Image: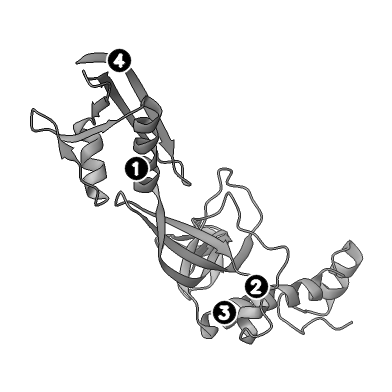
């Protein structure tokens, strides 16, 4: 039997996983093209439920065909099938990221104070507090940020045994429950690349209402303070003893 050539085949699936096979193809006395797949490739095919004939040495993975193109095409087809994916489960989830950026101390009455010096907490141990996210540079504004968005979480399983998760953005539907529809309809909300890790929770209307209420609270605070940020307005609000972050506390 004459060895014809060594050939390397390559396939890539939708998530970037690769499958490479390097094989020797020979031609026998009858003009048939033959090869035996490498053991590593056979194991991968076996995991996907595929089995092969054995060669004269008893090794599984023996293939033969009348033409070179035909034998290579059959192997490529098997590789694609092995790398194919099937939707295993689907679930509506709420993706969210909540961050606070702040730093302060607590006094004996659990009231925030600016630092842990004796002036503010006396000789007691400093109970230093920080937000959920600590930026690289310490001097930053105090911030609260909220991101929440519904996604369809899809779990795909490959024939080769691996799994992959995809998140498809969930678009609002007229038949959706109110708070799900509210979250899905926000056009310009996104997670921060510098914030804490994005988490998820299974969908329920109660969960959606929680996030909607948080977002509405921020929107109401924005409406309350955005027209009172000039030096003159700040002095006027201060003279009245009003709290700019207490909803409905600024008299116009």
Frontmost of labels 2 and 4 is: 4
Towards the viewer: 4 or 167 = 4
**Residue 71 on image: x %, y %:** 34, 32
**Residue 1 on image: x %, y %:** 19, 16
**Lower sequence index among marks 2 and 4:** 4
Frontmost of labels 3 and 2 is: 2
Give the vertical position of 167 relative to 139 (above or below).
below
**Lower sequence index among marks 2 and 1:** 1
* Mark 1 residue crowding within 10 angstroms, few (<14) / some (14–19) / many (20+): some
The residue tagged 4 is 4
Q: Is residue 55 visible?
A: yes
The span from disc 3 to disc 4 (Cα, nearest Å) is: 64 Å
**Lower sequence index among marks 3 and 2:** 2
The mark found on residue 208 in the picture is 3
**Residue 108 on image: x %, y %:** 45, 72
**Residue 78 on image: x %, y %:** 34, 42
The span from disc 4 to disc 1 (Cα, nearest Å) is: 22 Å
The span from disc 2 to disc 4 (Cα, nearest Å) is: 59 Å
Q: Taking 138 as reference, is 16 left or right?
A: left
For mark 1, give the secondary structure: helix
Q: Taking 177 as reference, is 47 left or right?
A: left
Q: How is the image coloured?
A: one colour
Q: Taking 133 as reference, is 227 left or right?
A: right
* Mark 3 residue crowding within 10 angstroms, few (<14) / some (14–19) / many (20+): many
The mark found on residue 78 in the picture is 1
Towards the viewer: 7 or 232 = 7
The residue tagged 2 is 184
Towards the viewer: 206 or 218 = 206
**Lower sequence index among marks 4 and 1:** 4
For mark 3, give the secondary structure: helix
């Amino acid at each position: 039997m004459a060895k014809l050539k060594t050939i390397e085949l390559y396939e890539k699936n939708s998530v970037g996983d690769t499958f490479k096979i390097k094989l020797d193809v020979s031609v026998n006395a009858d003009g048939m093209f033959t090869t035996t797949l490498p053991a590593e490739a056979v194991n991968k095919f076996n995991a996907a439920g595929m089995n092969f004939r054995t060669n004269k040495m008893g090794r599984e993975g023996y293939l033969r065909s009348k033409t070179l193109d035909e034998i290579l095409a059959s192997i490529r087809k098997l590789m694609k099938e092995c790398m194919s994916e099937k939707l295993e489960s689907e679930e509506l989830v709420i993706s969210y990221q909540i961050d606070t950026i702040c730093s302060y101390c607590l006094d004996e009455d659990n009231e925030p104070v600016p630092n842990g010096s004796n002036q503010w907490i006396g000789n007691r141990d400093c109970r230093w507090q920080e937000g959920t996210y600590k930026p690289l540079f310490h001097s930053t504004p105090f911030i609260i940020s909220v991101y929440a968005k519904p996604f369809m979480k899809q779990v795909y399983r490959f024939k080769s045994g691996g799994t992959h998760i995809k998140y498809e953005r969930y678009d609002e539907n007229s038949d959706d429950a109110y708070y799900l529809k509210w979250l899905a309809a926000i056009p310009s909300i996104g997670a921060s690349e510098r914030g804490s890790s994005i988490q998820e929770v299974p969908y329920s209307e109660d969960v959606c209402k929680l996030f909607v209420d948080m977002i509405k609270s921020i929107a109401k605070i924005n409406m309350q303070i955005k027209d009172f940020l000039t030096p003159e307005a700040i002095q006027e609000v201060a003279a009245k003893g009003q709290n700019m972050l207490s909803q409905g506390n600024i008299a116009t």
